[in-house]
Amino acid sequence: MNDEARRRGRSLASMIFTTRPSSRASDLALAAVRIALAWIFIYYGAGKLFGAFNGPGIHRTALFFSNTAHLHPGGFFAVLGGTIEFGGAIALALGVFSRLAGLALFGDQVMAMITVTWTNGINSESLTPGYEFNMALAVMALVIVFLGPGRASVDALIERRFSRSKRLTPE
C-alpha cells in the first residue's frame, strides 16, 4: 500500500469516526433541524389557529383541549398552543430568538405528552398515537436550545453585528 492510499484511508477513517463535527457540518445539521421543525410546527400551529391544512381551527382545538387534554380554559390553551407552534416555527425558520423558540416548542411537546399521548405509551400502531412523535420533536427542539441556530440564522447575524460594534467602541 502506497502513502497516497494510506492518507486517503486515514482521511476516510477520520471522517467516519470523528466525534467533533466541522463548523460547516454543524451549521448544515442545525439548519436541517430548524427547517424540519418549522415545517412540522407551521402545519400544526396554522391548523390550530386558522384551520389551515384541514386543521381543526381555534374552536375545535379549544374543545379538544378542554375535553381530551383537560386544559381549562380550552380557548386560552388553544390560542397559546397554536401561537407557540406557529410563532415558534416562524422564529426557527428565520433563526431569530431560536433558543427561546426551541424552549417554548420543547415545553409545548412535553405538555402534549403529559396531557394526551403518555397514556398510550410509545406505540404508534394503535388507533390513538403514542408519544414517540412528541418526544422526537421535543428532542429536536432541545438541540436548538443547547447548540443554537448555527451561522445561517438571523441570530448569528445579530451576534456578528454586536461583536463588530463591540470591537469598534473604545473602552
Image (tube, grey):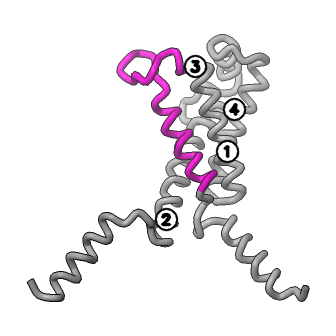
> Foreground residue, 53 or 146?
146
Q: Name which residue type carries label 3.
A: Val
Q: Is residue 114 left or right of residue 35?
A: right
Q: Which residue is mark 4?
A: 81
Q: Residue furthest top?
A: 67
Earlier-in-chain disc, 1 versus 2: 2
* Dot in front, 2 or 4: 2
Dot 2: within a 10 Å radius of its alpha carbon, few (fewer than 14), some, or many (20 or more) residues?
A: some
Secondary structure category for the residue under label 2 = helix
Q: Quote the CA–CA distance across marks 2 and 4.
A: 30 Å
Res 103 label? 1
* Dot in front, 4 or 1: 1
Q: Quote the CA–CA distance across marks 4 and 1.
A: 13 Å
* Dot in front, 2 or 3: 2
Region in magenta:
117-146
Earlier-in-chain disc, 1 versus 3: 1
Q: Quote the CA–CA distance across marks 4 and 3.
A: 14 Å
Earlier-in-chain disc, 2 versus 3: 2
Res 26 label? 2
Secondary structure category for the residue under label 1 = helix
Residue at the (43%, 24%) spot, across then down: 122
- Quadrant containing the C terminus is bottom right
Q: Name which residue type carries label 1.
A: Leu
Q: Residue furthest right?
A: 171
Q: Which residue is mark 3?
A: 116
Residue at the (70%, 26%) spot, across then down: 58
- Position of 92 relative to 9 (above/below): above
Judged by its main secondary structure, the magenta piece is helix
Secondary structure category for the residue under label 4 = helix
- Quadrant containing the N terminus is bottom left
Dot 3: within a 10 Å radius of its alpha carbon, few (fewer than 14), some, or many (20 or more) residues?
A: some
Res 64 label? none
